[in-house]
Image (cartoon, coloured by chain):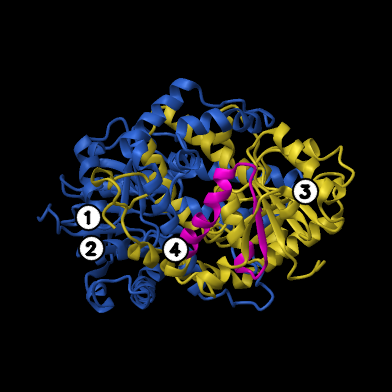
Chain colours: A blue, B yellow
Amino acid sequence: MDTGRNGPVAVVGGGSMGVGWAIVFARSGREVRVHDAAPAVRSAVLGAVAERLAALAAHDLLSEAPGVVMARITVAETVGAAIAGAVHVQENVPERLDLKTQVFRAMDAVAAPEAVLASSTSSLPASEFAAALPGRARCLVAHPANPPHLLPIVEIVPAPFTDPEAVERTRALMAQAGQVPVVLQREVNGFIYNRLQGAVLREAYWMLEQGIADVASIDRVMTSGLGLRWSIIGPFETADLNYQGGLEEHARRMGERYRQMGAERGQPDGWDETLVARAAAERRALLPLEDWGARVAWRDERLMKARAAERESPPYTASGENTAAGGLREGA
Amino acid sequence: MDTGRNGPVAVVGGGSMGVGWAIVFARSGREVRVHDAAPAVRSAVLGAVAERLAALAAHDLLSEAPGVVMARITVAETVGAAIAGAVHVQENVPERLDLKTQVFRAMDAVAAPEAVLASSTSSLPASEFAAALPGRARCLVAHPANPPHLLPIVEIVPAPFTDPEAVERTRALMAQAGQVPVVLQREVNGFIYNRLQGAVLREAYWMLEQGIADVASIDRVMTSGLGLRWSIIGPFETADLNYQGGLEEHARRMGERYRQMGAERGQPDGWDETLVARAAAERRALLPLEDWGARVAWRDERLMKARAAERESPPYTASGENTAAGGLREGA
């Protein structure tokens, strides 16, 4: 079995997520075997793959012909056939604990000892569905965004029993596949991705409830402002670049105001000086203050590229009355 | 005085925000007069404008030659000279209540009766600095993102005493200038933009404090996942498109999990069925369920455009050691 750079990958669960993962691995040169328990899903996999590959090729986002990538993907009738010889197994069955537990038990029984078993779950930590398995040390979560072939982030979340080598092999495999792996130091409800998303959704629903603005307006503030910038720099770097002097200056000027916004909803947690100093030290290791201006200029270059791409994008046309739908630009 | 589509605009405060605003209004065909109390700032305005216009032209984001846009911008030695004949005044002085109060008093004394006086403040409601003015009915907040010439969102926030006609004229002026105006129904601490930003920053600092991940990892989850998608669809539409069945199905499947993520930090507010039904009804007015699949396909088209633009963007090069700085992609 080839456990190295080119070993085959199994995808268990052939819905939209599974199709996205199959493309991610196949376009990086790996053989991919996809299994789904439902025959109807199995027979739809290759058509869905072909459709998405054609779209990627149309945007010049594939380095090979779609047929070449396609040829690396096969559909397996059984879990065993999909997993045999795989160096990595990516599971995408529905988000139910009983199902994940059962599927991981089956996968652990047939997978080669060196294979990593990774779940795409967005909310169930591996310690809840893999703790009882003989091979639990090679089990972990590798949570993608939706859709995984277009959004590169992958959260790798080890359980307390996960072997650090399985974490490192998954990180390397995802990076080699062109994804952006991030390793969490420990399990936490929602991981990073859905904790940030939950914080935004709770605030958005609260503003709707308070009659501050409607759904379309709140969405528009995100797409035409915050989200556009967050697609280029994250929340810490955004704060770091918003004030000359960086993150510490941001906390001095804005910290109390942000604390109040939480406090008036019953959540008074802010950030104290020690925590800000720690975050600022990490930022300074990434970006010395003498390079601050250059990084702001880089941010603006990236924003201009994004605006140009947006302008060239096709408008949404499924329904003629929906041109003001959230996410579409007005007047720009 | 031309109060119509082509009337001149005054920009009071000539720092980075003022320069951005001057470009926004001038590229839409308006005459712009910029004033700053500091002579050194005044003499730097036109150079800063020229530099940003050249960058916009290089990205093919100007519909006219930079010199043509530039010729519409002049620097005024006094507030009075800037404001005389202006149909709209955009104030950008430092974020201090005493200063805003003083500048609005001066502006209200000299502006034509029809002129709207708008503050770029990100946190001070107009009722705090304009309540005592004879012309308070034409005072409001028009809060841009940073930088305003690249991020189109503008939050228009009326005080209780603001004339609805001043709100409507500001909305129309911003839309005509190619910005994306959003009108808030009432004043609230942080407006929409910084409430969403504050929710994310508080959650991000909490995760750092809890040792879940470092600053760079948290930022990367945003840039390579959430932010990339939020640059195209906002939080409500994201939830709406993540589950067949839309926002109500999202709430059924994920509502309790998101509520728990808040509750374990002492903030148990979730969203009840009535609120979800209201949000879902607004979404269905924007996007009938029968168009759901077409809108998902549109989202993916936009994501592919964004990924292609990202790939063509210049890497950050100010410091050779910073290629792993937050916001940069690894391995993609």
Query: Residue at point 67% right, 33% down?
Result: B96
Distance Cα–Cα, label 4 vs label 1: 34 Å
Q: Earlier in the sequence, mark 1 or mark 2?
A: 2
Q: Are marks 4 and 3 on the same chain?
A: yes
Q: Chain of mark 1?
A: A
Identified by mark 2, the residue type is: Ser
Q: Which residue is mark 1?
A: A176
Look at the numbered disc 4 and give the secondary structure of its residue: helix
Q: Which residue is mark 2?
A: A28
Q: Chain of mark 3?
A: B
Identified by mark 3, the residue type is: Leu
Q: Is residue A94 above or below residue A19?
A: above
Identified by mark 1, the residue type is: Gln
Q: Percent x, y for residue A47?
A: 37, 76
| Circles 2, 4 touching at the beta carbon (< 8 Å) | no
| Circles 1, 2 touching at the beta carbon (< 8 Å) | yes
Identified by mark 4, the residue type is: Ala
